[in-house]
Amino acid sequence: MKISGFSMVRNATKLYYPIKEAIESILPICDEFIVAVGKGDEDDYTRERIESIDSDKVKIIDTVWKEKDFESGRVNAIQTNIALDECSGDWCFYLQADEVVHEKYLPVIKDRCRELLDDDEVEGLVFDYKHFWGDYEHYHNSHGWYKREVRVIKNNIGVRSHNSAQGFRKNGEPTKAAHANAEIFHYGWVRPPHYMQSKKKALDSVHWGKEEAEEFYKTEPDEFDYGPLDQLPIYKGTHPEVMQDWIAKMDWEDKLQYSGEPDPRRELHKHEQTKNKILTSIEQWLERKFGGKVYLSSHRNYKLLGEK
């Protein structure tokens, strides 16, 4: 059995993405790791950071992001599929540049791949998500944040990156997936506030187009406002070992709001909105009563296969 890791990235160092840590987190169980590296800005050194990984498993594909693909984020799926097409493994393990896997899950994931390799019904593996916010202690468990997504797929069966590369689909249909019995640590919303605002602008650019994003952010503040963090639960577990040096660099505590009310001058974040607070309470009550993850939303990129 062979496992290929793959990812896509652009301007990672300029936008504070832990791309090296993401790759290193699953490299031990991968036979190769393919990463499509888009040509970045002159002050970015993403390619050099990936090259610093001490492994001949890592293979870089140099790409150019075309502005005509900056619509609804489809450039993300295009770049993801470029890397996927170069994978030679039986399984393909996808991580985005801000997603990291805890080392405790690696043997579990590999065992699941071995167990389900010859099960033709299974097209992929779905992971639970922990979305950190503001710092490395607070995370989301609220409605409006995806709780699961497919990150491992079988190769050469027609499964492709979908839409803005959040998930995968086969012939436009949700991927039939078993549970990986593992979790993805998502650090996409943990950055110094000025980096967070720059990342948000870059993300909006590939969904709206550069011109519209440039116009919108002319009147936006230079730093992102995470809001009062005491509205979120506190994480009491450990972070992946590969993230320890990255986490030690955190120096923006003085820019965070740990209590109080949200700034009334800005739009409320999803978890601050009354509607989502009510839906979150209902979901959590249903989870306590019946067990498992509960979604009061019909959108999925996968179909979970029973007890597999």
Image (spheres, helix red, strand yellow):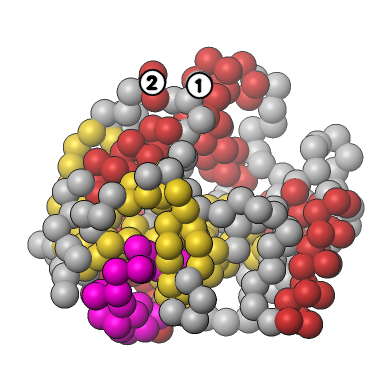
Q: Is residue 189 magenta?
A: no
Left or right of 227 on screen, residue 83: left
Query: Residue 59, image x and y in percent?
Result: 15, 52
* Residue contact between numbered discs 2 and 1, judged by CB atoms under 8 Å: yes
Q: Residue furthest left?
A: 56
From what the image shows, is residue 246 above or below residue 75?
below
Q: What residue span does the magenta drawing correspond to?
A: 105-126
Q: Which residue is mark 2?
A: 67
Looking at the rendered structure, the kind of residue marked 1 is Gly
Element marked by disc 1: loop
Element marked by disc 2: helix
Q: Looking at the picture, tell me which residue is in the foreground, 111 or 202.
A: 111
Q: Residue at x 17, y 63 (%)?
A: 89
Query: Residue 88, image x and y in percent?
Result: 14, 58
Left or right of 91 on screen, residue 201: right
Q: Is residue 12 visible?
A: no
Q: Quadrant of residue 234?
A: bottom right
Q: Quadrant of residue 278?
A: bottom right
Which disc is residue 209 wearing?
1
Q: For marks 2 and 1, give the CA distance.
A: 8 Å
Q: Residue at x 49, y 20 (%)?
A: 210
Q: Is residue 305 visible?
A: yes
Q: Is residue 120 magenta?
A: yes
Looking at the rendered structure, the kind of residue marked 2 is Glu
